Image (cartoon, rainbow, N blue to C red):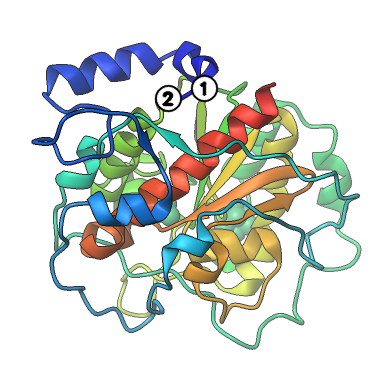
Amino acid sequence: MSEELKQEPGFGSSLALLDALGIGPVWVRRELAVEEVQGTAATQEALAPTPAAPVESPNVSAPQPVAAEAKAAVVTHARPSPPLPVAPAPAAAPVEQEGGPPSWLDDMDFGTALEPVLIPDGDEEQDAPSVDPLIARLKTMDWPQLKQQVAGCRRCGLCQGRKNTVFGVGDEKARWLFIGEGPGRNEDQQGEPFVGPAGKLLDNMLLSMGVKRGENAYIANIVKCRPTDDNGRDRPPSAQEVAACLPYLQRQIELIQPTVLVALGKTAAISLLGMDPATPVSRLRGTVHRYQDRPLVVTYHPAYLLRTLTDKSKAWADLCLAMSTYQAQSR
Ligand code: URA
Ligand code: SF4
């Protein structure tokens, strides 16, 4: 791990915490000697604790071999929203790891996860209206104005069932932006993103990267109001709901100016990249995408990881790719 990363605020304290917990930051089994481990994904796979049998998920496609995916490549998609010039690819540093599996890889809790995230097929043509007066107004909004706008928003049907809008939380000058799908029950009640079990895991993932909610990290969602089905259960937002709400996230990104975006799960990734909803997360991982001229790395949604031990080492590989991208951008 580079000196720059070690000097990042919060990095030392997270190391201290991991040490205090007896969890070394080296990606090897704890009983093995702590040595320099070159962190190819294949190595991680080999060294990761043997996972339990996969939990079948009807909506999430089978993971693909990770070794090839972990090699950083930069992909620019044809339909970013709105389209912007494409900057040259960042030279992602090799993924170096002097870290063992972070604690969040071990502390999995089953049975509380949200449903996997998907946008239904066939809604792509009904994007945001071509003339949307809000878009121009958003361009000039500062944080208080934007928060006020979201708090009173009725741009889509999700306003009807919400208890609270969930604007986002964190350091408004953060260099890391983590983007989820949309609020669930807990988030709707508390008005803050990722406060349920998935949020706990996300906080641990952040800690393992040397950042914290509110300290060089901002957490937001694609939609700001909770989507539910007819039975009151969480569901992914529709394409129309995404189109209605995305301008708020876009303004948040303009205000924050993050260095690296991390899309948590499929809805976030395909919404930002304008991709076919049938694209499996496994195909989006392992690549540095671009969103509005900023690098974007895709990983699994924490709720999915809570249920799928087999993919936790891949999520760590994704975070390593994100960290090496961050370092490359910081040079
Ligand atoms: N899942 C998300 O995608 N976002 C939240 O805020 C909570 C759960
Ligand atoms: Fe407005 Fe977004 Fe809530 Fe829809 S989800 S009502 S667009 S804030």
Q: Which residue is mark 2?
A: 211
In the picture provided, is 170 more to the left or to the right than 18?
Answer: right
Instruction: Tell me which amino acid carries mark 1.
Output: Asn
Q: Which residue is mark 1?
A: 216
Q: Residue at x 20, y 26 (%)?
A: 24
- Mark carried by residue 244: none
Examine the rendered structure and indicate whether residue 100 appears above or below residue 83: above
In the picture provided, is 11 more to the left or to the right than 225?
Answer: left
Closer to the camera in the image, 220 or 215: 215
Tag 2's secondary structure? loop
Label 2 close to label 1 by CB (< 8 Å): yes
The quadrant of the picture occupied by the C terminus is top right
Give coordinates of residue 207: x percent, y percent. Answer: 34, 28
Looking at marks 2 and 1 on the same chain, the residue that comes earlier in the sequence is marked by 2
Examine the rendered structure and indicate whether residue 128 appears above or below residue 253: below
Instruction: Tell me which amino acid carries mark 2.
Output: Val
Tag 1's secondary structure? loop
Tell me if the residue at label 2 has its CB under 8 Å from ligand 1: no
Residue 302 visible? The answer is: no
**Residue 93 image-quadrant placement:** top right
* Mark pair 2, 1: CA separation: 6 Å
